[in-house]
Amino acid sequence: MAIKKEVKILSNQNLVDISLQETGTVEAAFDICLLNDFGLTDDREPGEVVNVDVEFKDNEVVLFYKRNMVKPVTGGLGTIDAAYAVEVYVAENYWV
């Protein structure tokens, strides 16, 4: 039996933050939403457990976060626009 990968949401973390932290990609946020029956811009509660057992993976980004003990916390997606989400994605990819 496969072990389900889960993570607890921190205060002000959104699903894109969780996706980057756990998979290294923004694309995986959509799969995480489908897996958990969430909307991408839905606000999540701190401490809420999210299943992040998805296929997308960029190990360099994941290792960067782990090595530097970084957990992205950019706030609720409901308060930002899509252009900002793209800027965050681009900035994250230039960190490694």
Image (cartoon, helix red, strand yellow):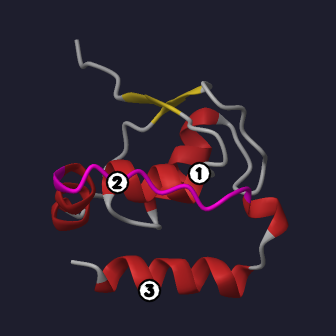
Does residue 16 appear to the left or right of 5 in the view shown? right
As drawn, the label of residue 90 is: 3
- Kind of residue indicated by mark 2: Val
Q: Tell me whether circle 3 and circle 1 mark residues in contact (CB < 8 Å).
A: no
As drawn, the label of residue 70 is: 2
Q: Which badge, 3 or 2, is on the more N-terminal residue? A: 2
How busy is the neighbourhood of tag 3: few (under 14 within 10 Å), some, or many (20 plus)?
few
- Residue bearing mark 1: 15
Q: At which x and y percent is residue 7? A: 44, 31
Q: Which badge, 1 or 2, is on the more N-terminal residue? A: 1
- Kind of residue indicated by mark 3: Val
Q: Which badge, 3 or 1, is on the more N-terminal residue? A: 1
Dot 1 falls on a residue whose secondary structure is helix
In the image, the segment drawn in magenta is 67-76
**Residue 77 is one of the magenta-drawn residues:** no
Q: Quadrant of residue 84?
A: bottom right
Q: Is residue 25 above or below residue 88?
A: above
Q: Main secondary structure of the magenta part?
A: loop
Q: At which x and y percent is residue 38? A: 70, 41
- Kind of residue indicated by mark 1: Leu
